[in-house]
Image (cartoon, helix red, strand yellow):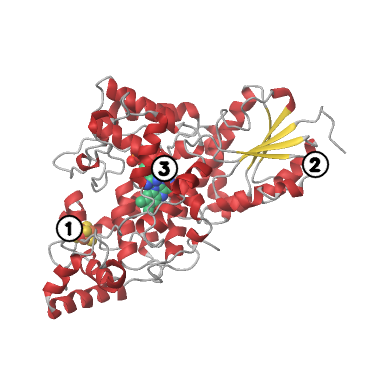
Amino acid sequence: MPRENRSPVLVPVLGDQLTRDLASIWGRTKDDTVILMMEVWDEATYVRHHKQKIALIFSAMRHFAAELRDAGWQVDYVRLTDPDNAHSFTGEVARAAERHEPRAIRVVEAGEWRVQQAIEEWPDKFDCPVEILTDDRFISSIGEFREWAEDRKTLRMEHFYREMRRKTGLLMEPDGKPVGGEWNYDQQNRKPPKGEMDAPERPLFEPDAITNEVIALVEEKFGDHFGSLDNFGWPVTREEAELAADAFFEERLGKFGDYQDAMVHGEDDLWHSMLSTSINLGLLDPLELCQRAEAAFKDGKAPLNSVEGFIRQLIGWREYVRGFYWHFMPGLQTDNALDAHRPLPEFYWTGETEMRCMADCVRSTRDNAHAHHIQRLMVLGNFALLAGLDPQQVQDWYLVVYADAYEWVELPNVAAMILYADGGKLASKPYAASGNYINKMSDYCKECTYSPSIKTCEGACPFNPLYWHFMHRHRDRLESNPRIGRIYSTWDRMGEQKQAEYLDSAQEVLDTLEPAGKGWARGQ
Ligand SMILES: Cc1cc2nc3c(=O)[nH]c(=O)nc-3n(C[C@H](O)[C@H](O)[C@H](O)COP(=O)(O)OP(=O)(O)OC[C@H]3O[C@@H](n4cnc5c(N)ncnc54)[C@H](O)[C@@H]3O)c2cc1C
Ligand code: SF4
């Protein structure tokens, strides 16, 4: 029987869809719509997320529900502690369908493959029409990326990025050329840290009553998860996120480019925007941010290398990894092209290691549920690659520990960018580096137990022998790679004794790695 016209349309809004511009809300009238928001156990527990990540998402959801109600929307909000909580999105939508008898369900596609699989079963499960809408918060739809990727031999981000520049018109001249004459100013964005780094502090937002209630809930239910809640100061509303963006544009965008790859002990944010949590939740619109950055350049308030770098991260990398994820799922989850099986070491959780760079990155991760890009890539990720850590354990770690981590963005960065587990579909070569790189781009090595200039044996920076061990064990695959293959002539010139020293030193490092105890990422 068709439902009466008086019954409402049910609009489930997922935890990372927190905007009134969402395609499923847009154009609806308040008196015949019920917005359903759900805190469900399956999502909160499928990995043992960092405590700040759970607190952030639930607090932002509760604030968004309040904002909608204040604006006159009818919101049905299911709390985690609801005794009848159905544990899954599908279970909650089924319960809501009983309560409201909707004439239709209208939902925006999920960010994560796992959730989307569940949503695609809804049309068969519920006895009303289910409309699944494209998430138009992204500039490129999943279909557009597919079209772009099909028939291409290589899927380099740079080519995709140029398409996105043309599509958005960002930093484009009227004649179709890029502003400044170049598409990419990355070469100018690699200044090492020198002297006093006087990066302004980002605003931290004092938890209000809603956030404090959520923090108490997280301590009670997830108290043994990784991470600390002490520093919680993430924006949890659109208003706060906009204040955080204002502070970035006014105080940090100028030097964002120059020091994008720099790392300084104890300086966790530097000139990074720290906006990923807000963007991924839906509190900020990435296109609007890019337009603001472009305006800052046009007004002479920020240099081109910073502005282009920021825009490239958003309409280039962010859009690209999202398209890449959907193009290669579900296989991306289990790819292991380098046949890596070493368990994740315990120090990824405890930070207890003499490697000063690793210890600092884990500390920032634990305290802030954040580490900046180059720490994720060239310290934590580089070690995982060189040591041959198991991709699924590394993926779990990154998904658990960062407040901005959703599988669509985490997985391509981990499996493809840092681990080369996809066999090179994303990156033209593995991002492998010795201690020299970290020494050049950070101040970590100055006070480390190890020395980046010692290559093997006593006192050697572990990244040095591990680098050659990695190159040696993957020679068959990498020697013919034009971007990295030449390194083997250096290796061959070393002679057998030096080579043996490198390999023995690396083996010593690998033998000392204590595997993580069970239960940090999954299970009890
Ligand atoms: C191994 C690894 C795992 C990562 N996991 C995540 C993750 O789970 N979630 C996440 O949002 N980002 C992830 N990133 C990308 C990047 O590290 C973070 O987006 C960034 O550190 C967030 O801090 P920020 O907002 O200060 O970024 P900024 O340095 O200020 O950059 C601006 C914005 O660009 C976007 N961006 C930059 N680089 C990337 C990228 N490689 N992929 C996608 N978006 C990008 C982000 O939205 C970011 O907010 C990962 C990178 C690596 C190497
Ligand atoms: S010497 Fe090596 S281990 Fe120590 S901080 Fe430098 S790169 Fe890291």
At numbered mark 3, what does the secondary structure look like: helix, strand or loop? helix
Q: In the image, is the residue at mark 2 within 8 Å of ligand 1 by its beta carbon? A: no
Measured Cα–Cα span from mark 3 to mark 1: 28 Å
**3 or 1: tag closer to the N-terminus:** 3
Res 274 quadrant in image = top left
Instruction: Identify the amino acid type marked 1.
Output: Asn
Percent x, y for residue 207? 48, 34
Gap between marks 1 and 2 measured at Cα? 62 Å
Q: Residue furthest top?
A: 299
Numbered tag placed on residue 318 in the rendering: 3
Q: Is mark 3 within 8 Å of ligand 1?
A: yes
Residue at the disc numbered 2: 98
Locate residue 216, reporting x and y percent: 55, 44
Please report the residue visible at 49 percent of the width from the left and 29 percent of the height from the top.
238
Write down the residue under mark 1: 436
Task: Characterize the local packing of mark 3: few (<14), some (14-19) or many (20 or more) Cα atoms within 10 angstroms.
Answer: many
Q: Quadrant of ligand 1?
A: top left
Distance (Cα) linking label 3 and label 2: 38 Å
Left or right: 1 in relation to 457: right
Identify the residue at image location x=50%, y=38%: 281
Residue 254 in the image: state x and y as whole percent: 25, 30
- Give the structural element (helix, strand or loop) at label 2: helix
- Residue type at tag 3: Arg
Query: In the image, is residue 89 above or below residue 166?
Result: below
Callout 1: SS: helix
Mark 3 or mark 1, whichever is nearer to me: 3
The amino acid beneath tag 2 is Glu
